[in-house]
Image (spheres, rainbow, N blue to C red):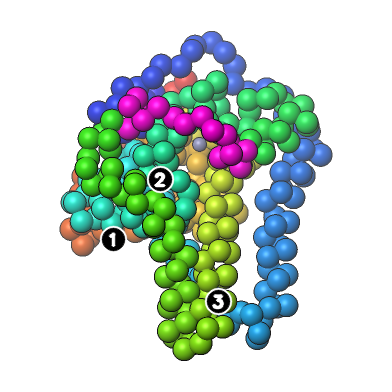
Amino acid sequence: MTVGYGPGMTTPTSPAGKPILGRKRPVPAHIAVYAFVIVPFLALLAAVPLAWGWGLSWLDVALAAAFYVLTCLGATVGFHRYFTHGAFKAGRALRIGLAVVGSMAVQGPILHWVADHRRHHAFADREGDPHSPWLFGTSPAALARGFWHAHLGWVLQRDLTNQERFVPDLLADRDMRVVHRLFGPLTIVTLALPALLGGLISWSWAGALTALFWAGLIRVFALHHVTWSVNSVCHMIGERPFAARDRSANFWPLAILSMGESWHNLHHADPTSARHGVLRGQIDISARTIWLFERLGWAWDVRWPTPARLARITAGVVA
Ligand SMILES: [Zn+2]
Ligand SMILES: [Zn+2]
């Protein structure tokens, strides 16, 4: 099986023989994982009726949704499926557009993001993986520590992934180096733009302020946690219908919010596939967006899954 984390990259080999699965996660730790994911969202939802009418309007909701969808797709279609894995080819305009909008998800500058993620695939759930929840053991305490590390803790570490090794293709592209350096200004844009729109449409300072809060800060916060949940939850809980050499799993509750990225077991089994939700009923909004780009003539050489390819990676067929 190939790791396939990008065109022109060499595929690292993994050590053979070591079992990947430990014992099953104890129930208390299992409940804790769910609690970490669900409680902050419930708290946020509880804040909505409290703020409705004085600190939250339909305009804020619409702006938050629009910027969420836009920046999420920038990260999933752009940073992830296109730049990291080369799932399709695109012209210069779309390439720069995806790099800019992906940066507006505020998940780190493009060279860092892509380097970290290629490293994640090269060492998935082994020593060297920047954000595996399985590096500390399988006791409840080790899993709690692993969940924290995979979700957010790794973001706070200072060690950066070696760009020369993992993203030589992007380093060689002047456009990408420029977008990388513009990460700071783009972070301001992603917060200021909804505030500007909210202020202009409502023609009030209050409208600008509430749009900044809901469509700027809360939207970035929500997308952060959805993305980080793919790193943490989707390597702990879910279905594993495909043969991947790690603990990646398909976690259906996040399919819509993650725009298809939570079909993470398929993704690790076939990393360059443009579609992650390949089974019946698995909604994949990012794949649909790539399909639209293809129809518009903006994307080509799209690596759509084929029955033969899927048969190859179905669990039990390959080791
Ligand atoms: Zn993963
Ligand atoms: Zn990936």
Question: N-terminal of the two: label 3 or label 1?
Answer: 3
Which amino acid, by three-letter code, is at mark 2?
Pro
**Residue shown at 39%/51% (left/top)?**
183
Above/below status of 171 relative to 127: below
Query: Is the Cβ of the residue at disc 3 closer than 8 Å to that at disc 2?
Result: no
* Image mark for residue 223: none
Residue 78, compared with residue 164, is above or below; it is below
Q: Evaluate whether residue 270 shows in this view.
A: no
Nearest the eye: 97 or 235:
97
* Residue under numbered circle 3: 209
Residue tagged 1: 292
Dot 3 or dot 2, earlier in sequence: 2
Q: Which mark is residue 109?
A: 2
Q: Is residue 126 left or right of residue 267?
A: right
Q: Does the magenta stretch include residue 269?
A: no
Extent of the magenta region = 152-167
The image position of residue 33, as x and y in percent, is 71, 43
Q: Few, some or many C-alpha atoms within 10 Å of disc 2 (few <14, some 14-19, many ≥20)?
A: many
Residue situated in front as seen by the camera: 171 or 249: 171
